Protein backbone atom coordinates (compact mmCIF):
# COMPACT_ATOMS: atom_id res chain seq x y z
CA UNK A 1 0.00 0.00 0.00
CA UNK A 2 2.83 2.41 0.93
CA UNK A 3 4.55 1.63 -2.35
CA UNK A 4 1.40 2.43 -4.33
CA UNK A 5 0.95 5.66 -2.40
CA UNK A 6 4.53 6.81 -3.10
CA UNK A 7 4.10 5.95 -6.78
CA UNK A 8 0.88 7.94 -6.90
CA UNK A 9 2.58 10.96 -5.32
CA UNK A 10 5.39 10.75 -7.89
CA UNK A 11 2.91 10.66 -10.77
CA UNK A 12 1.07 13.65 -9.33
CA UNK A 13 4.33 15.62 -9.15
CA UNK A 14 5.18 14.75 -12.76
CA UNK A 15 1.68 15.73 -13.84
CA UNK A 16 1.95 19.14 -12.15
CA UNK A 17 5.33 19.80 -13.76
CA UNK A 18 4.20 18.84 -17.26
CA UNK A 19 1.01 20.82 -16.88
CA UNK A 20 2.98 23.93 -15.91
CA UNK A 21 5.39 23.58 -18.85
CA UNK A 22 2.70 22.90 -21.45
CA UNK A 23 0.49 25.77 -20.35
CA UNK A 24 3.42 28.20 -20.23
CA UNK A 25 4.30 27.78 -23.90
CA UNK A 26 2.27 30.12 -26.13
CA UNK A 27 2.05 31.12 -29.77
CA UNK A 28 2.05 34.84 -30.60
CA UNK A 29 0.95 35.97 -34.08
CA UNK A 30 3.07 39.09 -34.58
CA UNK A 31 0.81 42.11 -35.10
CA UNK A 32 -2.32 39.91 -34.92
CA UNK A 33 -4.55 41.07 -37.83
CA UNK A 34 -1.90 43.56 -38.97
CA UNK A 35 0.47 40.63 -39.73
CA UNK A 36 4.13 41.34 -40.65
CA UNK A 37 4.16 44.24 -43.10
CA UNK A 38 5.06 47.93 -43.41
CA UNK A 39 2.60 49.39 -40.86
CA UNK A 40 0.67 52.53 -41.74
CA UNK A 41 1.36 53.92 -38.26
CA UNK A 42 5.12 53.39 -38.31
CA UNK A 43 7.09 51.39 -35.72
CA UNK A 44 4.60 52.41 -33.01
CA UNK A 45 2.17 49.82 -34.37
CA UNK A 46 4.42 46.90 -33.38
CA UNK A 47 5.50 48.60 -30.15
CA UNK A 48 1.85 48.86 -29.12
CA UNK A 49 1.29 45.19 -29.95
CA UNK A 50 4.37 44.13 -27.98
CA UNK A 51 3.29 46.19 -24.94
CA UNK A 52 0.21 43.98 -24.50
CA UNK A 53 2.16 40.70 -24.52
CA UNK A 54 4.28 38.62 -22.13
CA UNK A 55 6.94 36.44 -23.79
CA UNK A 56 8.64 33.45 -22.12
CA UNK A 57 11.29 30.95 -23.16
CA UNK A 58 9.61 28.23 -25.24
CA UNK A 59 7.01 30.56 -26.79
CA UNK A 60 6.71 30.86 -30.58
CA UNK A 61 6.49 34.00 -32.73
CA UNK A 62 4.55 33.65 -36.01
CA UNK A 63 5.45 36.22 -38.68
CA UNK A 64 2.70 36.20 -41.35
CA UNK A 65 3.90 37.69 -44.65
CA UNK A 66 3.85 36.99 -48.37
CA UNK A 67 7.02 35.33 -49.66
CA UNK A 68 8.94 37.75 -51.87
CA UNK A 69 7.44 40.90 -50.35
CA UNK A 70 9.01 40.77 -46.89
CA UNK A 71 11.51 38.89 -44.74
CA UNK A 72 12.19 38.54 -41.02
CA UNK A 73 15.67 38.74 -39.54
CA UNK A 74 16.86 38.64 -35.95
CA UNK A 75 19.47 41.35 -35.42
CA UNK A 76 21.54 42.99 -32.69
CA UNK A 77 20.28 46.06 -30.84
CA UNK A 78 22.72 48.28 -32.72
CA UNK A 79 21.47 46.95 -36.07
CA UNK A 80 17.86 47.37 -34.88
CA UNK A 81 18.42 51.00 -33.86
CA UNK A 82 20.10 51.92 -37.16
CA UNK A 83 18.07 49.58 -39.42
CA UNK A 84 21.32 47.93 -40.53
CA UNK A 85 20.43 44.80 -42.54
CA UNK A 86 23.96 43.76 -43.54
CA UNK A 87 24.78 41.19 -40.81
CA UNK A 88 21.64 39.58 -39.34
CA UNK A 89 21.90 36.88 -36.68
CA UNK A 90 19.39 34.81 -38.68
CA UNK A 91 17.02 35.49 -41.57
CA UNK A 92 13.96 33.87 -43.17
CA UNK A 93 12.48 34.92 -46.51
CA UNK A 94 9.60 32.43 -46.61
CA UNK A 95 6.27 33.33 -45.05
CA UNK A 96 4.81 32.52 -42.70
CA UNK A 97 7.89 32.09 -40.45
CA UNK A 98 7.73 30.51 -36.98
CA UNK A 99 10.49 31.46 -34.52
CA UNK A 100 10.82 29.68 -31.16
CA UNK A 101 12.16 31.84 -28.33
CA UNK A 102 15.01 29.77 -26.89
CA UNK A 103 16.73 32.30 -24.62
CA UNK A 104 15.76 35.01 -22.16
CA UNK A 105 16.58 38.67 -22.72
CA UNK A 106 15.98 41.22 -25.45
CA UNK A 107 15.33 40.05 -29.02
CA UNK A 108 15.19 42.30 -32.07
CA UNK A 109 13.61 41.63 -35.48
CA UNK A 110 13.26 43.60 -38.71
CA UNK A 111 12.47 43.22 -42.41
CA UNK A 112 15.56 43.40 -44.65
CA UNK A 113 13.70 44.65 -47.74
CA UNK A 114 15.08 48.17 -48.49
CA UNK A 115 13.42 50.95 -46.44
CA UNK A 116 10.90 48.62 -44.75
CA UNK A 117 12.67 48.88 -41.39
CA UNK A 118 12.90 52.68 -41.51
CA UNK A 119 9.17 52.79 -42.32
CA UNK A 120 8.39 50.82 -39.14
CA UNK A 121 8.62 47.10 -39.94
CA UNK A 122 10.65 46.24 -36.84
CA UNK A 123 9.91 44.58 -33.50
CA UNK A 124 11.73 44.57 -30.14
CA UNK A 125 10.62 42.18 -27.37
CA UNK A 126 11.89 40.99 -23.98
CA UNK A 127 11.74 37.30 -23.13
CA UNK A 128 11.62 36.05 -19.53
CA UNK A 129 12.32 32.57 -18.16
CA UNK A 130 8.97 32.44 -16.33
CA UNK A 131 5.44 33.61 -16.99
CA UNK A 132 5.93 36.77 -14.91
CA UNK A 133 6.22 39.96 -17.00
CA UNK A 134 9.74 41.03 -17.95
CA UNK A 135 10.95 44.62 -18.50
CA UNK A 136 10.48 45.83 -22.07
CA UNK A 137 13.66 46.69 -24.02
CA UNK A 138 14.30 50.41 -24.07
CA UNK A 139 14.66 51.67 -27.63
CA UNK A 140 15.01 55.27 -28.81
CA UNK A 141 12.15 56.79 -30.82
CA UNK A 142 12.30 55.80 -34.46
CA UNK A 143 13.35 58.63 -36.72
CA UNK A 144 10.80 59.76 -39.27
CA UNK A 145 11.41 58.04 -42.62
CA UNK A 146 13.07 60.09 -45.33
CA UNK A 147 10.70 60.56 -48.23
CA UNK A 148 11.39 61.77 -51.75
CA UNK A 149 10.50 65.48 -52.23
CA UNK A 150 7.55 64.55 -54.46
CA UNK A 151 6.00 62.32 -51.80
CA UNK A 152 4.03 63.74 -48.89
CA UNK A 153 5.64 62.88 -45.52
CA UNK A 154 2.23 62.45 -43.87
CA UNK A 155 1.91 59.07 -42.22
CA UNK A 156 -1.00 59.79 -39.90
CA UNK A 157 -3.66 57.13 -39.45
CA UNK A 158 -7.29 58.15 -39.61
CA UNK A 159 -9.00 57.38 -36.29
CA UNK A 160 -11.68 54.72 -36.22
CA UNK A 161 -15.17 56.17 -36.34
CA UNK A 162 -17.74 55.20 -33.74
CA UNK A 163 -20.79 53.37 -35.13
CA UNK A 164 -23.41 55.81 -36.41
CA UNK A 165 -27.14 55.37 -36.98
CA UNK A 166 -28.09 53.75 -40.28
CA UNK A 167 -29.38 57.09 -41.61
CA UNK A 168 -26.09 58.93 -40.93
CA UNK A 169 -22.99 58.92 -43.10
CA UNK A 170 -20.23 56.63 -41.85
CA UNK A 171 -16.48 56.32 -42.36
CA UNK A 172 -15.11 52.83 -42.97
CA UNK A 173 -11.42 52.07 -42.30
CA UNK A 174 -10.66 49.68 -45.17
CA UNK A 175 -9.33 46.43 -43.71
CA UNK A 176 -9.56 47.84 -40.15
CA UNK A 177 -6.24 47.02 -38.40
CA UNK A 178 -4.92 45.35 -41.56
CA UNK A 179 -4.83 48.72 -43.31
CA UNK A 180 -4.39 49.00 -47.08
CA UNK A 181 -1.56 46.63 -47.95
CA UNK A 182 -0.83 43.35 -49.72
CA UNK A 183 -2.85 40.93 -47.55
CA UNK A 184 -1.33 37.64 -46.46
CA UNK A 185 -4.66 35.90 -47.11
CA UNK A 186 -5.06 37.02 -50.73
CA UNK A 187 -8.13 38.83 -52.22
CA UNK A 188 -10.52 37.09 -49.83
CA UNK A 189 -9.10 39.22 -46.99
CA UNK A 190 -10.63 42.48 -48.22
CA UNK A 191 -13.77 40.83 -49.55
CA UNK A 192 -14.35 39.18 -46.16
CA UNK A 193 -13.94 42.63 -44.57
CA UNK A 194 -16.52 44.15 -46.96
CA UNK A 195 -19.09 41.37 -46.65
CA UNK A 196 -21.92 42.26 -44.28
CA UNK A 197 -21.26 46.01 -44.44
CA UNK A 198 -23.87 48.40 -45.89
CA UNK A 199 -22.16 51.09 -47.95
CA UNK A 200 -24.32 54.06 -49.02
CA UNK A 201 -23.96 57.37 -50.82
CA UNK A 202 -22.38 59.88 -48.43
CA UNK A 203 -20.19 57.33 -46.64
CA UNK A 204 -16.39 57.58 -46.75
CA UNK A 205 -13.74 54.92 -47.33
CA UNK A 206 -10.40 55.51 -45.55
CA UNK A 207 -7.39 53.72 -47.03
CA UNK A 208 -4.49 53.70 -44.53
CA UNK A 209 -1.10 53.16 -46.19
CA UNK A 210 2.47 54.45 -46.06
CA UNK A 211 3.37 56.97 -48.75
CA UNK A 212 5.65 55.50 -51.39
CA UNK A 213 4.74 51.88 -50.64
CA UNK A 214 1.12 51.78 -51.89
CA UNK A 215 -1.59 53.87 -53.54
CA UNK A 216 -5.32 53.48 -54.18
CA UNK A 217 -6.94 53.75 -57.60
CA UNK A 218 -10.60 53.60 -58.55
CA UNK A 219 -10.98 51.46 -61.65
CA UNK A 220 -13.53 49.82 -63.92
CA UNK A 221 -14.79 46.28 -63.42
CA UNK A 222 -12.77 45.09 -66.43
CA UNK A 223 -9.56 46.55 -64.97
CA UNK A 224 -10.42 45.04 -61.58
CA UNK A 225 -10.92 41.58 -63.10
CA UNK A 226 -7.62 41.67 -65.03
CA UNK A 227 -5.59 43.83 -62.57
CA UNK A 228 -4.98 46.28 -65.43
CA UNK A 229 -3.33 49.40 -63.96
CA UNK A 230 -2.99 51.43 -67.19
CA UNK A 231 -6.22 53.48 -67.18
CA UNK A 232 -7.53 54.12 -63.64
CA UNK A 233 -10.50 56.45 -63.15
CA UNK A 234 -8.42 58.28 -60.53
CA UNK A 235 -5.44 57.52 -58.29
CA UNK A 236 -4.44 58.78 -54.83
CA UNK A 237 -0.80 58.33 -53.78
CA UNK A 238 -0.89 60.08 -50.38
CA UNK A 239 -2.08 58.13 -47.34
CA UNK A 240 -4.36 58.02 -45.57
CA UNK A 241 -6.64 58.45 -48.60
CA UNK A 242 -10.26 59.43 -47.91
CA UNK A 243 -12.71 58.62 -50.72
CA UNK A 244 -16.31 59.85 -50.48
CA UNK A 245 -18.91 57.55 -52.02
CA UNK A 246 -20.85 60.01 -54.21
CA UNK A 247 -22.86 57.63 -56.38
CA UNK A 248 -24.57 54.27 -56.03
CA UNK A 249 -23.61 51.06 -57.79
CA UNK A 250 -20.52 48.86 -57.82
CA UNK A 251 -17.17 50.45 -56.99
CA UNK A 252 -13.77 48.86 -57.62
CA UNK A 253 -10.39 49.79 -56.09
CA UNK A 254 -6.84 48.44 -56.24
CA UNK A 255 -3.18 49.34 -55.70
CA UNK A 256 -1.35 50.03 -58.96
CA UNK A 257 2.11 49.05 -57.64
CA UNK A 258 3.46 46.12 -59.72
CA UNK A 259 2.10 42.77 -58.52
CA UNK A 260 0.08 44.18 -55.60
CA UNK A 261 -3.35 43.74 -57.20
CA UNK A 262 -2.67 40.18 -58.36
CA UNK A 263 -1.59 39.30 -54.80
CA UNK A 264 -4.88 40.54 -53.35
CA UNK A 265 -4.70 44.31 -52.79
CA UNK A 266 -8.06 44.98 -54.41
CA UNK A 267 -11.57 45.74 -53.15
CA UNK A 268 -15.06 45.55 -54.69
CA UNK A 269 -18.09 47.04 -52.92
CA UNK A 270 -21.73 47.86 -53.72
CA UNK A 271 -23.09 51.29 -52.76
CA UNK A 272 -26.79 52.09 -52.30
CA UNK A 273 -28.39 55.49 -52.50
CA UNK A 274 -30.11 55.34 -49.11
CA UNK A 275 -29.39 54.36 -45.53
CA UNK A 276 -31.22 51.04 -45.92
CA UNK A 277 -29.34 47.76 -46.11
CA UNK A 278 -27.09 47.67 -49.15
CA UNK A 279 -27.15 45.06 -51.86
CA UNK A 280 -24.63 42.27 -51.26
CA UNK A 281 -21.05 43.41 -51.78
CA UNK A 282 -19.52 41.80 -54.89
CA UNK A 283 -17.70 38.72 -53.69
CA UNK A 284 -14.50 37.18 -55.04
CA UNK A 285 -14.30 33.93 -57.00
CA UNK A 286 -11.10 32.41 -58.33
CA UNK A 287 -10.89 31.84 -62.08
CA UNK A 288 -8.95 28.91 -63.60
CA UNK A 289 -6.15 31.31 -64.54
CA UNK A 290 -5.64 32.31 -60.94
CA UNK A 291 -7.04 35.88 -61.30
CA UNK A 292 -9.86 37.03 -59.07
CA UNK A 293 -13.18 38.43 -60.23
CA UNK A 294 -16.44 39.44 -58.55
CA UNK A 295 -19.16 36.81 -58.69
CA UNK A 296 -22.51 36.03 -57.11
CA UNK A 297 -21.02 33.21 -55.10
CA UNK A 298 -19.91 33.78 -51.56
CA UNK A 299 -16.11 33.78 -51.15
CA UNK A 300 -14.51 30.63 -49.88
CA UNK A 301 -13.52 31.12 -46.30
CA UNK A 302 -10.18 29.93 -44.99
CA UNK A 303 -9.65 28.58 -41.47
CA UNK A 304 -9.13 31.37 -38.93
CA UNK A 305 -5.51 32.17 -38.05
CA UNK A 306 -4.14 30.81 -34.78
CA UNK A 307 -5.33 32.84 -31.83
CA UNK A 308 -2.57 35.06 -30.51
CA UNK A 309 -1.04 33.78 -27.28
CA UNK A 310 -3.04 30.53 -27.42
CA UNK A 311 -1.60 27.78 -25.15
CA UNK A 312 -0.67 24.45 -26.71
CA UNK A 313 -3.68 22.22 -26.01
CA UNK A 314 -1.96 19.15 -27.39
CA UNK A 315 0.85 19.37 -24.84
CA UNK A 316 -1.62 20.13 -22.07
CA UNK A 317 -3.54 16.92 -22.82
CA UNK A 318 -0.51 14.61 -22.63
CA UNK A 319 -0.02 14.68 -18.84
CA UNK A 320 -3.74 14.05 -18.28
CA UNK A 321 -3.66 10.92 -20.43
CA UNK A 322 -0.42 9.74 -18.83
CA UNK A 323 -1.75 10.16 -15.29
CA UNK A 324 -5.04 8.43 -16.14
CA UNK A 325 -3.23 5.32 -17.39
CA UNK A 326 -1.02 5.27 -14.32
CA UNK A 327 -3.99 5.54 -11.94
CA UNK A 328 -5.83 2.74 -13.75
CA UNK A 329 -2.83 0.46 -13.37
CA UNK A 330 -2.55 1.23 -9.64
CA UNK A 331 -6.23 0.50 -9.06
CA UNK A 332 -6.00 -2.83 -10.87
Image (cartoon, rainbow, N blue to C red):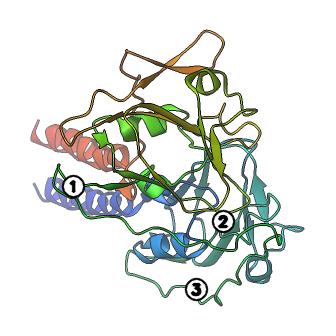
Mark found first going from the N terminus, 1 or 3: 3
Disc 3 to disc 2, C-alpha distance: 17 Å
Mark yes or no: residue 87 visible. Answer: yes
Task: Identify the residue at horizontal 55%, vertical 62% (top origin).
Answer: 240
Q: In which quadrant of the rendered view does residue 125 lie? A: bottom right
Which residue position holds label 3? 137
Q: Position of residue 140 (x, y in %)?
A: 65, 90
Which residue position holds label 2? 121
Please tell me whether mark 3 sits on a helix, a strand or a loop.
loop
Which residue position holds label 1? 168
Mark yes or no: residue 28 visible. Answer: no
Mark found first going from the N terminus, 3 or 2: 2
| 146 or 220, nearer to the observer | 220
Mark 1 neighbour density, 10 Å: few (under 14) some (14–19) many (20 or more): few
Disc 2 to disc 1, C-alpha distance: 37 Å
Q: Please state which of the two labelled residues, at mark 2 or mark 1, is closer to the viewer.
A: 1
Disc 1 to disc 3, C-alpha distance: 45 Å
Please tell me whether mark 1 sits on a helix, a strand or a loop.
loop
Q: Position of residue 250 (x, y in %)?
A: 43, 29
Indicate whether 114 appears above or below 76: above
Left or right: residue 278 compared with residue 2: right
Q: Are marks 3 and 2 in contact (CB under 8 Å)?
A: no
Q: Position of residue 17 (x, y in %)?
A: 33, 63
Amino acid sequence: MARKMSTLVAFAAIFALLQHVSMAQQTHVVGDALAWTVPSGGAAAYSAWDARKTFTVGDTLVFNFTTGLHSVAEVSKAAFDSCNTSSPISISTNGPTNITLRSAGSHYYLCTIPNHCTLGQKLAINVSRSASPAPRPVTPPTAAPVMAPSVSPSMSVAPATAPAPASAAQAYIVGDNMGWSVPTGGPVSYQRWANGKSFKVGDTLVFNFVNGTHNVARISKASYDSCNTTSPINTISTGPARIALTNSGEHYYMCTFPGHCSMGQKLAINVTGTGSAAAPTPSIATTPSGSTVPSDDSPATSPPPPSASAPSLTLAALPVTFLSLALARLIN
